[in-house]
Amino acid sequence: MSAGWAVALHGGAGVHAGRSYARAEACLAELVRAASDQLSDGAPALDVVERAVAAMEASGLFVAGRGSAPNRLGDVELDAAIMDGATHRAGAVAALQGVASPVTAARRVMDATSHVLLVGQGATLFAGQQGLEPILDLETWLTTPEGFRDGDLDEGHGTVGAVARDGKGRLAAATSTGGTYGASPGRVGDSPLIGAGTWADDLVAVSCTGVGEAFIRAAAAHDLAARVRYGGARLETATDAVLRRALELGGDGGVIALSREGPAVARFNTDGMKRAWAQEGAGAFVGSVGDDVRRVG
Ligand code: ASP
């Protein structure tokens, strides 16, 4: 018997105490309610995480999609991944340019090719062949995400992610990022790397945000899954252990995770993480700074 549906979203752990994230929270509240409706109607977890992440990309309120951070050359390079826990199928794009929704491109890589990861020009070419929406004018398309000020985009983890469990107990995860401000051209973080920033299998779904290099070196998302699978760890314990490990390796951040039962876990070792979650029969919640959360559904 299924434990019922559940969902969690994050909009990055680069939260600064004392700043307002009202618009990001309103967006997350709306999206978590929409995701809840979809899951109640029987939508697959995979479609729900893709839709939620695509909407966060389009909102311009996070460092992903329209809110992306230009690299040292002023180019915007986009990374995203999606994984279907029930089948272990995955798709990802990295250093993608000129495409409005990187998570949609990642889903197409998964569905329409035999590959897992396409990068750079090849990814852009593929997205064009798939007829995905192009970015026509980068200058007018880009926005500066809420809560960021000049000069601190580099400190802000504003990556977006989603994990969901549907009514059939299937798990899925997706993550999308517009990188870190002023990064080296070609720099790829953890988000599009399966097992680093994104993972889903039959037991857990994970999406990370934070200093990508540390999360890669910690194999964070897969390590969390391994702690649950082989060590029998509780989801929250495994999540905290992985965040500690990434911190030891030089990077702070946050994680959202779901297992086959129970509510989502949303943990971070920064000032906060923009986040929302909902569970069948247990309402919907949103928060950003510290432990303050409020019910939104
Ligand atoms: N993890 C992302 C990266 O390193 C950044 C973030 O989470 O904001 O690309």
Image: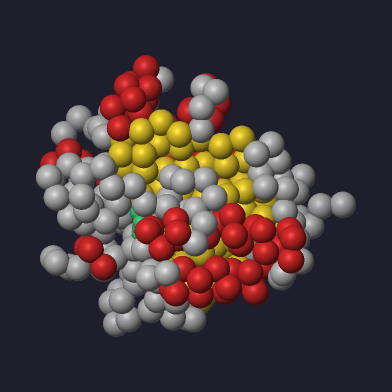
Q: Residue at x 38, y 79 (%)?
A: 271
For residue 278, what is the image quadrant?
bottom right
Residue at the far right: name it.
1
Quarter holding ligand 1: bottom left
Give the tally of numbered discs.
Answer: 0
Q: Quadrant of residue 297?
A: bottom right
In the image, residue 95 above or below residue 289: above
Q: Residue at x 37, y 17 (%)?
A: 129
Q: Is residue 25 left or right of residue 206?
A: left
Is residue 167 visible from the viewing direction of this image? no
The residue sitting at 87% across, 52% down in the picture is 1
Q: Is residue 278 left or right of residue 213?
A: right
Q: Is residue 235 left or right of residue 126?
A: right
Q: Nearer the viewer, residue 80 or 100?
A: 80
In the rendered view, would you say 202 is above or below 132? below
In x, y percent, where is residue 64? 33, 50
